[in-house]
């Protein structure tokens, strides 16, 4: 079931909302292209694309990876403008083409992610998505995983504080145990423009690009933390996908 975008289908003043699936990367720990793991007609990238559609995006863009194999799982596929520039480069590839759009960005390797998991992020960057007058909680983003999107590192939050957010943030990300989960992030058009500027100045780290002083970053507690788990190694795969995974010899 598709969840309506918090801006509302009848709200003609909201920016377009694009889903972005980041499919680049070497997948060295997996041993094969993560984005194409699973049944040929519904690999990991297709699962994430379907979740984005269920969250209410207007279109899905896939970036990086095997273009001929991935094109059918989204509305458009783009090669990375700057190969090897990591997740930030993939985000900028779409942001340059659609500076007017809000972006809901996901890594391709999140088999448990559903549309409902992403709606709170969209509400945080939507001017009409929550109670009027509720300011977003602001926190710096200080950690990322090995491949730049991830789930490791230390970014302590104040003890005893439940992180929530109201509408009007530029960037919205989930927080698990004091660590921002950059595998799924919602960006306003203003945030996208700032990130492109940082990238052009030489920045290649997702979390540092989000720390521009002018950006309001909302960190939220997820209802389903397990849905944010990514898969880096064969043993991380769900049983159904594990049976289909055959690393190259």
Image (cartoon, rainbow, N blue to C red):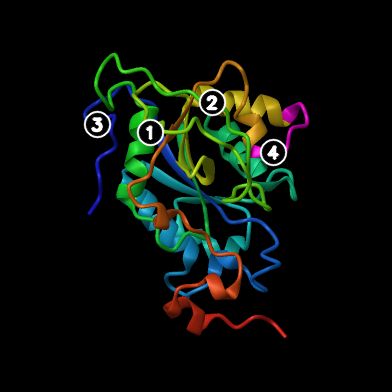
Left or right of residue 39, residue 200 in this image = right
Q: Which sits earlier in the primary sequence, circle 2 or circle 3?
A: 3
Q: Which residue lies under the disc numbered 2? A: 191
Q: Are marks 2 and 1 in contact (CB under 8 Å)?
A: no
**From the image, which quarter does the C terminus lie in?**
bottom right
Q: Nearer the viewer, residue 169 or 181?
A: 181
- Residue at (29%, 29%) from the top-left corner? 7
Q: Which residue lies under the disc numbered 3? A: 8
Task: Assign a secondary structure to mark 3.
Answer: loop
Q: Which residue lies under the disc numbered 1? A: 162
Q: Outermost residue toward the right?
A: 202
Q: CA distance from mark 3 to mark 4?
A: 33 Å
Magenta stretch in the rendered image: 200-206
Q: Is residue 138 above or below residue 220?
A: above
Task: Assign a secondary structure to mark 2.
Answer: helix
Q: CA distance from mark 2 to mark 3?
A: 21 Å
- Residue at (40%, 56%) from the top-left corner? 227
- Near mark 1 (Cα within 10 A), the count class, few <14, some 14-19 or many ≥20, is few
The image position of residue 245, as x and y in percent, is: 55, 80
Q: Which sits earlier in the primary sequence, circle 2 or circle 1?
A: 1
Residue 113: image quadrant is: bottom left
Q: Which sits earlier in the primary sequence, circle 4 or circle 2?
A: 2
């Amino acid at each position: 079931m598709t969840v309506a975008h918090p801006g509302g289908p009848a709200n003609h003043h909201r920016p377009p909302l694009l889903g972005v699936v980041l499919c680049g990367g070497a997948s060295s720990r997996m041993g094969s292209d993560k984005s194409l793991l699973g049944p040929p007609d519904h690999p990991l990238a297709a699962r994430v694309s379907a979740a984005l559609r269920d969250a209410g995006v207007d279109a899905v863009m896939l970036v990086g990876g095997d273009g001929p194999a991935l094109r059918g799982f989204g509305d458009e596929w783009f090669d990375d403008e700057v190969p090897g520039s990591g997740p930030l480069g993939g985000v900028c590839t779409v942001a340059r083409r659609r500076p007017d759009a809000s972006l809901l960005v996901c890594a391709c390797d999140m088999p448990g992610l559903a549309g409902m998991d992403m709606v709170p992020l969209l509400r945080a960057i939507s001017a009409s998505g929550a109670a009027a007058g509720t300011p977003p909680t602001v926190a710096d983003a200080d950690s990322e995983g090995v491949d730049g999107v991830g789930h490791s590192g230390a970014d302590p939050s104040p003890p005893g504080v439940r992180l929530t957010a109201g509408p009007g943030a530029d960037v919205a990300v989930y927080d698990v145990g004091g660590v921002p989960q950059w595998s799924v992030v919602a960006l306003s058009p203003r945030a996208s423009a700032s990130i492109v500027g940082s990238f052009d100045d030489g920045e290649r780290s997702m979390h540092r690009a989000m720390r521009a002083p002018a950006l309001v970053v909302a960190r939220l507690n997820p209802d389903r933390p397990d849905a944010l788990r990514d898969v880096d190694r064969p043993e991380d795969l769900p049983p159904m996908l594990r049976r289909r995974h055959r690393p190259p010899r």
